[in-house]
Amino acid sequence: MNDTAQPRSDPHSRELHVRVHGASAVRTPEPDDAAAREDVALRLAAWWEANARDLPWRFGRTTPWGVLVSEVMSQQTQMSRVVPYWIDWMARWPDARALAEASKADVITAWGRLGYPRRALRLQECARVVARDYADELPRTYDELTGLPGIGDYTASAVMSFAFGERIAVIDTNIRRVLSRVFLGAESLGGSASPAERALAGRVLPEAVRDSVTWNQSVMELGAVMCTAKSPMCEACPVARDCRFLKLGRPGLGERRTRPRQRFQGTDRQVRGLVLAALRGLPAGATLARADAETLWKDRAQLAACIASLDDDGLIEMTQDGALRLPQG
């Protein structure tokens, strides 16, 4: 798939390009400076219109449920890995009701190597609530969305903005990093979003609903592909001239990573993945003998603990003779 969208013919887009190229004043943006905020928003919107990655759930080509699935799959997972899984998933289970009626084994198998497979079962739990309580249509309010299994602040806000076109601040790691650099001239801290970061996101969100949706999309995209944590491409950035972080010499670049790099080799995540991969490779309903399972990892104690945790999470089942299988429900 071509990862870069071609420029789209849109009167609003043409207006943005004209206004951006016609801007004469160079401002140092402040969160409370409306003119500076507008200049940044116009530049980002024009850049988004010309350069947004052509992901299959963007540009009105899927349902709100499809947007939610893309957001759940994208958590802690590279977008390039998500696309083929999302396409296959939506072809098989295009709505909440279809996913709700699937077997757990099929759901876990379809999740493949996306990682953090508990997300797959939580997504199915969410689908069952949507199918049962909301007539197979995603609810449109923040409180109802966050009341669904596995749906937190970020996912609810993203669905409201990207699927329903509502004016709401969307706050993820990429957005926090861009806003902190552009408007504060500093790296964002790790951990959960602070009250100050949430306040900043609310203050710089454009008032117009359409502009706020484009703002959320463009800021997130900039953080994902250009204003990255360790190697930002400042020379090509559409808001370089407005960025306080760049004007200050990029202080502390990369020192405060919002998410430390996680070791994978030898971890429980790797062992759990090996067990699930072995089960996915079996015919439907087949079991993996315990003796065969014990060949998957040399550290028997770690393997046993990981098998027990998979069982606790509902990702596998153990038969009376100790064999393993994917859930049959």
Image: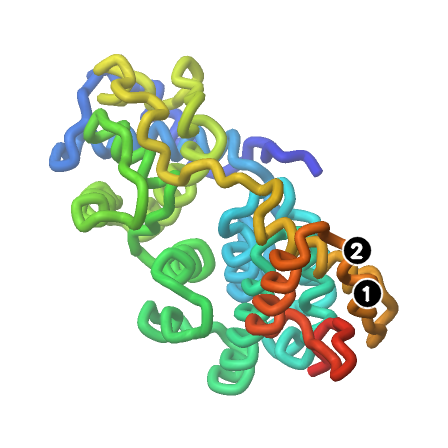
Q: Which mark is residue 91?
A: none
Q: Amino acid at mark 1?
A: Ala
Question: How many other residues sit within 10 Å of disc 1, few (<14), some (14-19) or many (≥20)?
Answer: few
**Distance between mark 1 and mark 2 Cα atoms:** 7 Å
Identify the residue shown where x is 41% and y is 55%. Answer: 158
Q: Position of residue 152 (x, y in %)?
A: 38, 63
Q: Is residue 2 left or right of residue 53?
A: right
> Where does label 2 land, which residue?
295
Q: Is residue 88 left or right of residue 243?
A: right
Examine the image and state in which quarter residue 46 appears: top left
Q: Position of residue 6 (x, y in %)?
A: 60, 32
Can you say whether 268 is above or below 226 in the image? below
Can you say whether 100 is above or below 37 in the image? below
> Where does label 1 land, which residue?
291
Residue farthest to the bottom, as pictured: 132
Q: Is residue 86 visible?
A: no
Q: Amino acid at mark 2?
A: Thr
Whether tag 1 and tag 2 are in contact, CB under 8 A, the answer is yes
Identify the residue shown where x is 45% and y is 73%. Answer: 149
Q: Is residue 290 left or right of residue 135?
A: right
